[in-house]
Image: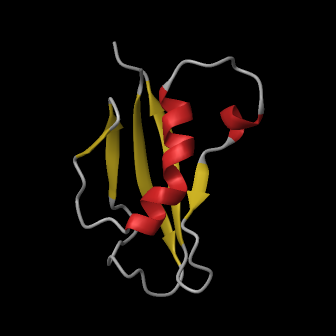
Amino acid sequence: MNDVRVEVVEVKGDCSAGLKVGDGFTLRDGVLIEPNGPLCVYAVAALSNYLTSISFERPDSGWITGVDRLQCPDPMNTVAFRVIRVNRE
């Protein structure tokens, strides 16, 4: 299983959790670690299926390998996240 780093890259409107560009967290073994601020449950729910998939080894083909940016589902106060797969040594 790989670590996944998630960082805020854009905020449109006012994030209800107060996230700012540069905020983020790491997913390690299914656990959110190193959050540097509160996380909105709706954003985490929107990201969770993708984060689970990217944390496991997978073929280098298919649509999921090209996804590196996701956003929360709030259409008025959108937070966009960059998702980076981190291979553990």
Relative height, residue 32 to residue 64 (above, below): below
Relative height, residue 66 to residue 16 (above, below): above
Identify the residue at image location x=46%, y=67%.
42
43 horizontally vs 3: left or right: right
**Which of 59/66 is in front?**
59
Residue 85: x %, y % from top left:
48, 32
23 horizontally vs 11: left or right: left
Identify the residue at image location x=50%, y=87%.
13
**Which of 64/24 is in front?**
64
**Which of 20/41 is in front?**
41
Q: How is the image coloured?
A: secondary structure
Identify the residue at image location x=67%, y=32%.
65
Residue 78: x %, y % from top left:
55, 76
| Residue with the most extreme top position | 89
Relative height, residue 84 to residue 35 (above, below): above
How many numbered discs sit on the rendered protein? 0
Relative height, residue 12 to residue 41 (above, below): below
Residue 86: x %, y % from top left:
42, 29
Which quadrant of the figure contains the C terminus?
top left
Which quadrant of the figure contains the N terminus?
top left
Identify the residue at image location x=34%, y=55%.
24
